[in-house]
Amino acid sequence: MTFLASHLSAQAADIPQPPTLAVKSYQLYDYNSERVIAEQDGNSRVEPASLTKIMSAYLAFKAVKNGHLTLTQTLPVSVKAWKVEGSKMFIEPNKPVTVDELLHGMIIQSGNDASIALAEGIAGSEEGFAELMNKEAARLGMKDSHFVNATGLPDPQHYTTAHDLAVLAGALIRDYPEEYKRLYSVKEYTYNKISQPNRNRLLWLDPYVDGMKTGHTKSAGYCLVTSAKRGDTRLISIVLGAPSDSARATESQKLLNYGFQFYESKLIYKRGSEVSSLKVWKGAENTVMATVAKDLSLTLPKGEYARVKAKVISQQPLIAPVSAGQQIGTIQFTLDDKLIAEHKLVAAKSVEAAGIFGRMLDSIKLWFE
């Protein structure tokens, strides 16, 4: 979905401006609609610190799903992983460690050692893993991100943006919901007889928060990606460059409260449901059902849904053969005559070409269209 307004009709709905936060940049993002509700320098490049590990986890989950790794499989611990600076889960070179333990150590304890061990297990080297990270970032549409390591340790060529992190966080929750649920809300993990708490304070402070990830270096400041769900609405907040651990939690809470208080997300069409029936020329059938390729939700200021108008635009002339899944039009949503969102419509099924006489008849009709 493409959204064409960043702060939608806030004055008409008597919605206050987003809170002013003491951070370098932030973004508040609706997971269902992929709508940016509020932001400050959301597309400015910043140092992600350990928020990098969201991408490392995404690739690890992908490797498990594809059968390249198993959760019970043990991975070797290199000297590089053992000696890495920063936060650790305290793995040791001569002690077997499973993929599942490494995932816990990377996500809950923010272990740099766990991140490198997983990267080497997946790609053979951290450098090779960084190449996979950049390919995945491009595939997900993270246009302003570049990775050179699996940990988030500072490097001039290691950067991202608040918006790209929102896209990544949403992709991880969408593509690996069970792993997200299993790991990201865990408050403490013990490995090698060392217990460490999850650094995400909001897991204790807000019952609606069910994850994501913290990050901190001296140059990046204190960073936090948070996801919270109330009812059917899930919001993702990205706070980058806060001055302290407590500040990143407080500022994230302000963002989430603002979003849940003044905005709402509604499912408009489920994937595969009928949106419209469109004319087909020179086909074995005269019409084809237009649908959406994925669930279509809209996020709007509360009280605004009654005034939204929808318009279907068909790609005409739509000439057979038509393939299932082929884009055949768009649906546009307007509010106060302003275009606020549009989404592509696809054919629900294939339509074969008509016989020679049917095609000839429609060719004649098209002359008069």
Image: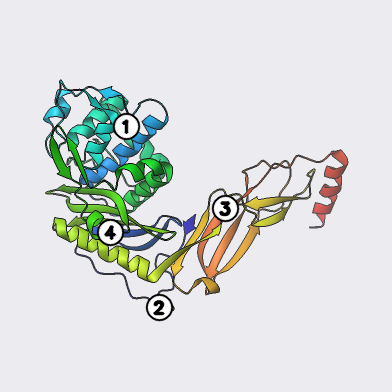
Vertical position of residue 284 compared to residue 222: above or below: above
The answer to whether the residue labelled 4 contacts the one labelled 1, judged by CB atoms less than 8 Å apart, is: no
The numbered mark, 2 or 3, whose residue comes first in the sequence reads: 2
**What's the CA distance linking mark 4 and mark 3?**
29 Å
Give the percent coordinates (x, y) of residue 289: 69, 51
Which residue is denoted by mark 3 in the rendering? Answer: 344
Residue 342 relative to residue 70: left or right: right
Query: Tag 3, which secondary structure?
Result: strand
Give the class, few, some or many, for how many residues have Cα within 10 Å of label 1's Cα (few <14, many ≥20): some
Mark 1 = which residue?
A: 131
Kind of residue sitting beneath label 1: Glu
Contact, CB < 8 Å: mark 2 with mark 3? no
Disc 4 or 3, which lies upstream in sequence? Answer: 4
For disc 4, the neighbor class at 10 Å (few under 14, some 14 to 19, many from 20) is: many
Instruction: Write the residue at 37% across / 30% down.
Output: 63
In the depicted structure, whether residue 273 falls above or below residue 63: below
Of the image marks 2 and 1, the number of the one nearer the N terminus: 2
Q: Tell me the amino acid under the disc marked 4.
A: Tyr
Residue 26 is tagged as 4
Q: Earlier in the sequence, mark 3 or mark 1?
A: 1
- Distance Cα–Cα, label 2 vs label 1: 45 Å
Label 2 or label 4, whichever comes before in sequence order:
2
Q: Secondary structure at mark 4?
A: strand
Expressed as whole percent of the image width and height from the top left, the position of residue 135 reads 37, 35
Label 2 belongs to which residue?
Answer: 11
Mark 2 in CB contact with mark 4 (< 8 angstroms) = no
Q: Amino acid at mark 2?
A: Gln
Whether residue 110 can be seen here: no
Q: Amino acid at mark 3?
A: Lys
